[in-house]
Amino acid sequence: MDSRLQAKFFPHSLEGEAHEWFYALPERSVTSFRDLSMLFLEQYKHNIKKELMVLDICAMRQGSDEKLDKFVVRFKRTWK
């Protein structure tokens, strides 16, 4: 798809906080869809689910003040 069309239709796909974020951007601050997508990813990167690696699981440790049953629950949630 043409990046100009993507930039034109992208705002119509947003709702709630993302919609408000987009319309709060300074006028003429985005010059391309690439710029827009980079800004969007930077703003919402905390919502991107990272693929869990075996090393991430192996690196999990029980906190010094964390009870074993709480650690097991956290471990199982992470593994899913």
Image (cartoon, rainbow, N blue to C red):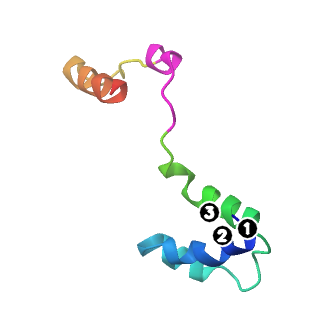
Which secondary structure, mark 1? loop
Q: Residue furthest front?
A: 1
Q: Which residue is mark 2?
A: 6
The structure residue drawn at horizontal position 28% and vertical position 23%, both measured from the top left corner, is: 76
Whether residue 67 is in magenta: the answer is no
Residue 18 percent location from the top left of the image: 50, 70
- Seen in the image, is 32 located left or right of residue 6? right
Q: Which residue is mark 1?
A: 2
In depth, the one of 73 and 11 nearer the eye is 11
Q: Is 17 above or below relative to 67?
A: below
Task: Choose top left, top right, bottom left or bottom right for residue 40.
Answer: bottom right
Q: CA distance from mark 3 to mark 1?
A: 19 Å
Residue 17 percent location from the top left of the image: 45, 72
Q: Is 10 above or below relative to 48?
A: below
Q: Which residue is mark 3?
A: 40
Q: Which residues are drawn in magenta?
A: 50-59
